[in-house]
Image (cartoon, grey):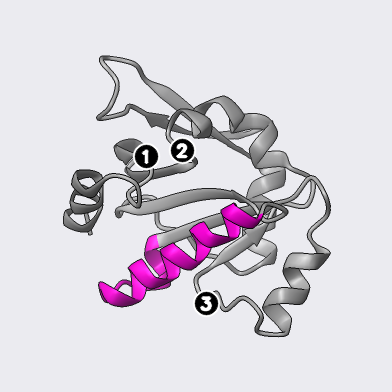
Amino acid sequence: MLLFLIILSSCNSESNSYSIIINDEFNNYLKEESIHIDFNQNLLIHYVDVGCGNCLNDLTNWEKFAKSNGMNGNQFLFIATSFNGIKDFEYMIENKILEFSLPIIYDKENLFYSENKNVMSQFDNSVIVNKGNVIIGGDPFSNRKLKEDYLSSF
């Protein structure tokens, strides 16, 4: 099995390094959804459980963040999963109950989560990577300095 590794190191941690694993199966999801990711530019990866109401607020925050700062979808990779099923989320998107226009991949088999649970939870499910290295990790909506760092990275 071919594995694509992104080595992560946090600005919030001492000298720890982390890896995100994107295996062949998950990479096929990206291709099926026609999501083309350039890992050589700054890229935000955010994992979200769309079965969680508060987590859906995170998506709304990211949408506002992107629009208010003139960012495009090529700078983001949102990975959605739900342990309760994703039909409710799909219904909300299709019926414009929740408006979200950034690229999102539905990880229906929880492949990303099962490979990267510990890593993403270390960074509140949000990291910015460039060429495999974490530039920033954490929730920019709860930390003003971190938000400024996120903005300056794009």
Report the predominant secondary structure element of the magenta stretch.
helix
Point out which mark residue 101 bears. 3
The residue at 24%/44% (across/down) is 146
Under circle 3, the secondary element is loop
Q: Nearer the viewer, mark 1 or mark 3?
A: 1
Residue 99 at x, y = what percent?
57, 79
Q: What amino acid is at disc 3?
A: Ser
Q: Residues within 10 Å of mark 3 (few under 14, many from 20)?
A: few
Residue receiving disc 1: 138
Cα distance in 3D space between marks 1 and 3: 22 Å
- Name the kind of residue labelled 1 in the image: Gly
Rounded to the nearest whole Å, what is the CA distance between mark 2 and mark 3?
22 Å
Give the percent coordinates (x, y) of residue 122.
46, 28
Residue under the image location 38 percent in, 72 percent down = 64
On screen, residue 110 above or below 44: above
Q: Is residue 20 above or below residue 139?
A: above
Which portion, as a residue range, is magenta?
53-75
- Disc 1 is placed on an element classified as loop
- Magenta-span inclusion, residue 142: no
Q: Determine the residue positioned at 52% across, 77% down.
A: 101
Q: Position of 115 compared to 84: left or right?
A: left
User: Mark 1 and 2 residues: CB-CB less than 8 Å, in contact?
Assistant: yes
Tell me if residue 48 comes above or below residue 34 in the rendering: above
Q: Quadrant of residue 129?
A: top left
Front one among 16 and 1: 16
Image quarter of the C terminus: bottom left
